[in-house]
Amino acid sequence: MEQTAHVRMDVKSLDEKFAHLAKNHPCLGRAPHKGRLHLPVSPACNIKCRFCTRAFNAIEERPGVTRRVLTVAEAPEAIDRALRLCPEISVVGVAGPGDSLATGHALACFRAMHEKYPDLLACLSTNGLLLPDHVEEILRAGVRTVTVTVNAVDPEIGARIVEKVSYKGKLYTGTEGAEILIDNQLRGIRLLAERDVLVKINTVLIPEINGGHIGAIAAATAERGAAIINIIPLIPQGDFLEMEPPTCAEINTAREAAEAVLPVFRHCQHCRADACGRLGGQDVSDQLFENLSAENTFSHG
Ligand code: CLF
Ligand code: SF4
């Protein structure tokens, strides 16, 4: 496992060090009036979370769902249209439907975006497996906010959540796979934080697996330089279909445990991979995708 790093942010880092980002980013709790566009350009994934169920439809309001996959070539038009539909959009993110580093699509989109819109924030959401190998590329693409989904920092717990990990041409399962994932996540967080990238942690709260582990996740990621954490209640699906979602009391307990070391974002909308609009406001992705359709290129990686 990775050794503890020397970087440690205090809870004021968001308002001090990252004020320039927080004032324009709707997912940091400081700018609820701003909007975000998600470009669903990343179809493949390199791990298998047991709760994951990616899908194509216009109905479900949850991560991993999109109307269709956009190609890199289609992204600039999507951004133009999104800004016309919702001028409050200040952030363009890639959050699936797979992992945003499993293909080069997300970073290619951000490079093209910054040629035309240098002031739009690029926001990358990833499982973190490939972070350590991509830090320079992420910086060159102009990404300054990265969300890493960390559901465990103990391989025994992680192995109950992640079924398999595909890394550098080999498939890993059990605690071996979880350890590779956790090690890369924590190293990646530290490398990004050292380069002044704002790292947000997303943690899926699965009460019977990681319910008592949230404080440890927050502490380990804060130690590496994460600036904020978002606790996402499990949506029971996939292998976890029979599980109970967390109660309000369990969510509050988890947030309190995390808040001991990190600011907690409390307004998450569990966005689709093709979300467009203000958080809590009208979503305009229906209009965005109207007549923006081409062939479907989805594939489970
Ligand atoms: Fe998108 Fe995520 Fe960036 Fe926000 S969403 S990639 S950090 S721009 Fe935000 Fe949506 Fe919650 Fe994500 S409300 S699911 S936390
Ligand atoms: Fe699904 Fe995301 Fe997990 Fe990949 S990292 S299996 S897309 S939830």
Image (cartoon, grey):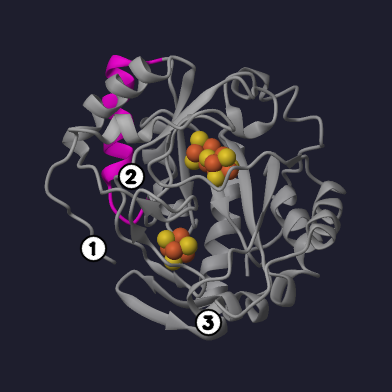
| Residue carrying label 1 | 299
- The residue located at (35%, 24%) in the rendering is 82
Circles 3 and 2: CB atoms closer than 8 Å: no
**Mark 2 falls on what kind of element?**
loop
Q: Answer with left or right where residue 165 lies relative to residue 233.
A: left
Q: Give the spatial CA distance, label 2 vs label 1.
A: 13 Å
| Residue carrying label 2 | 40
Q: Position of residue 156 (x, y in %)?
A: 66, 81
Q: Quadrant of ligand 2?
A: bottom left
Q: Quadrant of residue 170 in the image? A: bottom left
Which one is nearer the viewer's eye here, 44 or 183? 44
Q: Answer with left or right where residue 115 lies relative to residue 157.
A: left
- The residue located at (83%, 54%) in the rendering is 252
Q: Answer with left or right where residue 300 lies relative to residue 233.
A: left
Q: Give the spatial CA distance, label 1 vs label 3.
A: 26 Å
Chain part drawn in magenta: 101-118
Q: Answer with left or right where residue 276 lies relative to residue 108.
A: right
Q: Amino acid at mark 2?
A: Pro
**Mark 3 falls on what kind of element?**
helix
Q: Main secondary structure of the magenta part?
A: helix
- Say the numbered circle drawn on residue 235: none
The earlier-in-sequence mark between 1 and 3 is 3
**Mark 1 falls on what kind of element?**
loop
